Image (cartoon, rainbow, N blue to C red):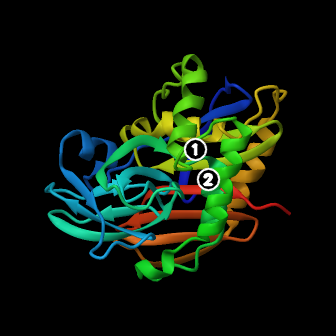
Amino acid sequence: MQLFDMDVTIGERIEVGGLGVFPLTGRVTDSPPYLTGPEAFEQGLIEVHELDPPQVPCLVVTNLADVPVLLVEGEMLVGGDQNRTMNVTVLCPPRSDLTVPVSCVEAGRWGARRQVSSSSRLAPGSLRAAKTASLEPPSGDVGSRRSDQGRVWEEVDRQSLSHAVESDTSALDDVQEEFEERIAAELDRIEPVDGQIGVICTIGAEVVGLDLFDRPDTLRQYLRAIVAGHALDAPAAMAPGGGLQAIERFLARVDGADCGTGPGVGLGDELMLAGSVAGIGLALEDHLVHLAAFPVPA
């Protein structure tokens, strides 16, 4: 089926706890070169630090590479004065500093500054959905990309209670670490299939989220983190569901959603979906780099 002018095919379901995971494969096209956040951190080509003076909804990213660095919506940045998660998807220009919009996911710490690193995790789907739905239309202004921080903290508290994990600083990362240890064997089964450029996840008969990328190598860097994030929202006892018809209906809603376009925070144009879905994405040179989309309750 068609999705943002891309032909995608839905693959076979894999179970992770109460979560259904469906690969999306598609034809790979040429895209501008970039490094993903995980690759850049591993190679020492990115630094993230606080503003001076520090501000909760912003961090500064220094890209030391000769190509752009991609940081995707929901990507976790651990350290600084408190842990954060990316509000939007950003392509950081080469050899430059860029202020990026973030949300705090560690309400009980401000200070005791630590070096910022990638946690190799993405925020839970429910938190990503709530955060995305609260954003204003894209304008290229970092200040306009602020989320409803109170709503984000509510989601972190809910996850902590749901999974019976106590954190001295109300850190989402602590909840994720303990939960992922519990389901490590199931997460280890998640491997991309040939030509996979996206993933769609279901809980029961309901679609809970979609991530679509421009190429398989990028999907590979984020797949486990996306699945683990959605698995936090999935009761282990949930009966299998989420047939192809429900997924096809959701993808049709994504493809037909109202799409606002504006300057990206970094390189490219930001896409924002509204209506029956909440979505955020990034295109560069009319080429979709990343799209995240979530259902909006009727």
In the rendered image, residue 38, in percent from the top left (x then y), is placed at: 33, 42
Going by the image, does 225 lie left or right of 243?
left
- State the mark number for residue 53: none
Q: Work out whether residue 22 or residue 55 is closer to the camera in this orientation and state it.
A: 55
In the rendered image, residue 248, in percent from the top left (x then y), is placed at: 74, 46
Residue that appears at 59% across and 74% down: 135
- State the mark number for residue 8: 1
**What type is the residue that disc 2 sits on?**
Gln
Going by the image, does 140 lie left or right of 65?
right
In the structure shown, which secondary structural element does the residue marked by tag 2 occupy? strand
In the rendered image, residue 31, in percent from the top left (x then y), is placed at: 32, 54
Q: Work out whether residue 186 or residue 150 is closer to the camera in this orientation and state it.
A: 150
Q: Work out whether residue 269 or residue 54 is closer to the camera in this orientation and state it.
A: 54
Q: Which comes before the other along the chain, label 2 or label 1?
A: 2
Residue 267, visible in the rendered structure: no
- State the mark number for residue 2: 2
Residues at circles 2 and 1 in contact by the CB criterion of under 8 Å? yes
